[in-house]
């Protein structure tokens, strides 16, 4: 993740940039954010609403929103989209068959016109078995 943000910095310069981390529930979004911030394995619980953290890499500020992916929260995703420059889409690599509804929601989100100018990063979270 450190290398990831360092690379982004070379592309985005040194003002603040809004990043959103999205994906279905249990994909590993909160794990990614807090492992990057604390450099440790973190214990998470399902995100109700969102977490927001500022990440600074060599004077470049990223305001990172980690949005809860539970089905009941997906109707709120669009309220986070405004002014987003970077979208990190997280999928669980062991989730071979995400629900039809979940897939449709991700497709609908990615089809939004407002994303035309945003960078999309597809993040395949290491599978549960792969880390054991
Ligand atoms: N083994 C393993 N477990 C992971 C990995 N990523 C996440 N987990 C576990 O999967 C569970 C869900 O992770 P979260 O990061 O809370 O998932 P989330 O995408 O934030 O979920 P919501 O907040 O409900 O949208 C937690 O128990 C994590 O410890 C991974 O790469 N490997
Ligand atoms: Mg979460």
Image (cartoon, grey):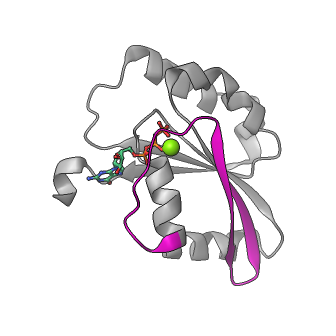
User: Is residue 79 at all visible to an observer of this figure?
Assistant: yes
Residue at x-position 51% and y-position 75% = 2
Residue 99 lies, in percent from the top left, at 37, 19
- Give the residue at the far bottom of this rendering: 58
Give yes or no for residue 15 being in the magenta stretch: no
Residue at x-position 77% and y-position 74% = 13
Nearer to me, 24 or 105: 24
Q: In this view, does 75 lie above or below 129?
A: above
Give yes or no for residue 47 being in the magenta stretch: yes
Mark count: 0
Residue 8 lies, in percent from the top left, at 63, 69
Quadrant of the image containing the C terminus:
bottom left
Nearer to me, 79 or 49: 49
Say whether residue 118 is left or right of residue 122: right
User: Is residue 112 at all visible to an observer of this figure?
Assistant: no
Nearer to me, 13 or 51: 51
Q: Is residue 60 above or below residue 72?
A: below
Residue 60 lies, in percent from the top left, at 75, 75
- Give the residue at the far top of this rendering: 101
Q: In this view, does 96 lie above or below 91?
A: above
Say whether residue 124 is left or right of residue 5: left
Task: Please give the range of residues in magenta.
Answer: 38-65
Nearer to me, 45 or 15: 45
Q: Is residue 40 above or below residue 53?
A: below
Residue 26 lies, in percent from the top left, at 40, 38
Q: In which quarter of the image is residue 40?
A: bottom left
Say whether residue 51 is left or right of residue 80: left
Residue at x-position 55% and y-position 70% = 37
Q: Quadrant of residue 72?
A: top right
């Amino acid at each position: 993740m450190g290398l990831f943000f360092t690379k982004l910095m070379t592309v985005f310069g040194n003002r603040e940039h809004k990043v959103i981390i999205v994906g279905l529930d249990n994909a590993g979004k909160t794990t990614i954010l807090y492992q990057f911030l604390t450099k440790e394995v973190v214990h998470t619980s399902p995100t109700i609403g969102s977490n927001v953290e500022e990440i600074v890499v060599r004077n470049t500020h990223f305001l990172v929103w980690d949005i809860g992916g539970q089905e009941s929260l997906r109707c709120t995703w669009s309220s986070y989209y405004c002014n987003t420059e970077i979208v990190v889409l997280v999928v669980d690599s062991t989730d071979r068959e995400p629900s039809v509804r979940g897939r449709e929601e991700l497709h609908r989100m990615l089809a939004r016109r407002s994303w035309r100018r945003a960078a999309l990063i597809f993040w395949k979270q290491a599978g549960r078995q792969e880390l054991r």
